[in-house]
Amino acid sequence: MLLATTSVVSSGEMRRPQRKASKTWKGMVKVPAGPFTRGSDTGDADEKPVRQIYLDAFWIDKHEVTAAQYRECVRKGGCKRPEETGTGCTYDEQSKGDHPINCVNWFEADAYCRWAGKALPTEAQWEKAARGTDARTYPWGNDTPTCRHAIIRENNATGCGRSETWPVGSKPDGASPYGALDMVGNVWEWTADWYESDYYTKAPSRNPPGPKTGVERIARGSSWSYTFDSAMRVTDRVDDAPGFAHNALGMRCVRP
């Protein structure tokens, strides 16, 4: 909406209307309204068909939610301590506050985003934020994934040789077209959507909300430990039970 005021200056000329500054959200990047290409003709069957999908504008976290941010949510009563506390989980590792929170199930991820005044992204929001509008294969383009771009398994060495997560934003060369970091690698990221293998064939072409019901939720973006190169494509879809947690699974949030 254009908010404007006019007044007369001494010369008798009218001042130009002043636009209200657009809202910005700290720690988030804006994904503008418009269409993008979702899906892949060369990927798995559940990535087909390729379609143009229109999304309203939204904001997405520039980084994956960190362990320190999640601890703050627990401290203030908005989140519960992650139920999973196995090897590699960052919640109890005080030196890893700037690493992505991991070992969180879907319910814990959803609770954090709600506490922060945000939400988990839909699959469509996640994919547009990761690939932009030019149908690229990876956030950075179409170049083969390497540890220059993302915290992944390279040459059979997980986590780019560290066998664990890294601090968020460690790979700026892997930024998405909108400036979101770690959209591939570090940790998989929960989305809001239930999984349906054929959802793309029947989803609305404008702001698809995801299936109304389901058994498993969708995670996107691969991780430091995954063993299949194909999972690094931004179109890859992985379904897990909402109660599942793993040291290679975390989240980021969105808001309008």
Image (cartoon, helix red, strand yellow):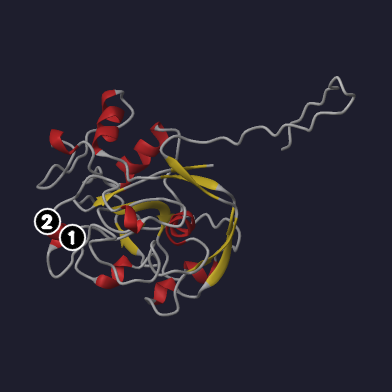
Label 1 vs label 2: CA separation?
7 Å
Q: Are marks 1 and 2 in contact (CB under 8 Å)?
A: yes
- Residue type marked 2: Ser
Residue 104 locus on image (x, y percent)? 25, 44
Residue shown at 80% from the left, 29% from the top? 15
Query: Which sits earlier in the primary sequence, circle 1 or circle 2?
Result: 2
Sort mark 1 into few (<14), some (14-19) or many (20+) by Cα contacts within 10 Å.
Answer: many
Quarter of the figure that contains the C terminus: top right
Residue 158 in the image, given as x and y percentages of width and height: 14, 61
Q: Nearer the viewer, residue 59 or 14?
A: 14
Residue at 24% in and 42% down: 101
- For residue 11, which quarter of the picture? top right
Left or right of 65 on screen, residue 256: right
Residue, disc 2: 163
Q: Nearer the viewer, residue 206 or 222?
A: 222
- Secondary structure type for disc 1: loop
Which residue is at 28% across, 28% downward? 72
Q: Which residue is mark 1?
A: 225
Q: Residue furthest top?
A: 10
Mark 1 is on which residue type? Ser
Depicted 147 relative to depicted 167: above or below = below
